[in-house]
Structure formats: structure tokens, C-alpha cells
Image (cartoon, rainbow, N blue to C red):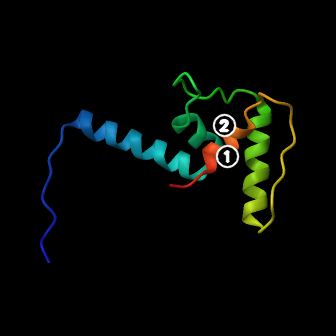
Amino acid sequence: MKAAPVVSCTPGQLQAWAALERRNQRCRANLTEFVREVVQDESGDPVDMNWPGHHVWHRHLDYCWSNGLRCLIMAPMSHGKSLSLVVGTSGP
């Protein structure tokens, strides 16, 4: 088995890598953070996740999935259900 190559980096590169790793960990642990970082609206801008209802939906979805339950969200049109819940939780 080959040894892994030694890679050197500057302190700035190391800090950038550490920041990226922290962001990745937040995204893995929190659906709202993942949607905020990854999902874009139709204009290519990050999805606005400032409405408190989005966080409640994500916590409800996490709770249901963690307990083997199905989740139903009912809300008016144009409130971000499809974008933050369907697109944000779709796998590859």
C-alpha cells in the first residue's frame, strides 16, 4: 500500500480548509444550514432562510425522519416549501 503524499500548505490555506470543514460539519448537522449554503433560487442567489417558519419546518422534518415518520407541511404558495424542503433534501 502506498503512503499518502505529503502536501504542504500555507497558514492561509490551512485556515481556509478549516473554515470549509466547519461549514461542511454545520451543513451535515443542520438542514437549514445546508439549504442556506447550497440551494439557490431561480435567479441563482442563495435561498432566503430568514423566515422562522423554515427552521420549524426543517426541525419537524428532521424529527419525523429520525422517528421513521412521514412529514406533511401545509403552507400557502410561494413560502419556500418546494425549494427548501424538496430540493434541499433531495439526494444525488
Q: Is 56 placed left or right of 22 in the picture?
A: right
Mark 1 is surrounded, within 10 Å at the Cα level, by few (under 14), some (14 to 19) or many (20 or more) other residues, namely: few
Give the farthest residue toward the bottom: 1
Residue 85 position within the rendered picture, expressed as x and y whole percent measured from the top left: 69, 44
User: Disc 1 marks which residue?
Assistant: 86
Q: Viewer-proximal residue, 33 or 39? A: 39
Q: Quadrant of the N terminus?
A: bottom left
Mark 2 is surrounded, within 10 Å at the Cα level, by few (under 14), some (14 to 19) or many (20 or more) other residues, namely: some
Query: Which quadrant of the structure image shows residue 80?
Result: top right
| Label 2 SS | helix
Q: Residue at x 79, y 51 (%)?
A: 60
Q: Viewer-proximal residue, 72 or 60? A: 72
Residue 47 position within the rendered picture, expressed as x and y whole percent measured from the top left: 61, 29
Q: Is 33 placed left or right of 13 in the picture?
A: right
Q: Residue at x 27, y 41 (%)?
A: 14
Amino acid on which the number 1 mark rests in the picture: Val
Q: Residue at x 55, y 52 (%)?
A: 28
Residue 79 position within the rendered picture, expressed as x and y whole percent measured from the top left: 78, 30
Is residue 38 positioned above or below 90 on the image?
Answer: above
Spatial separation of the CA atoms under disc 2 and disc 1: 6 Å
User: Disc 2 marks which residue?
Assistant: 83
Q: Viewer-proximal residue, 37 or 83? A: 83
| Label 1 SS | helix
Residue 52 position within the rendered picture, expressed as x and y whole percent measured from the top left: 78, 32
Amino acid on which the number 2 mark rests in the picture: Leu
Q: Are marks 2 and 1 in contact (CB under 8 Å)?
A: yes
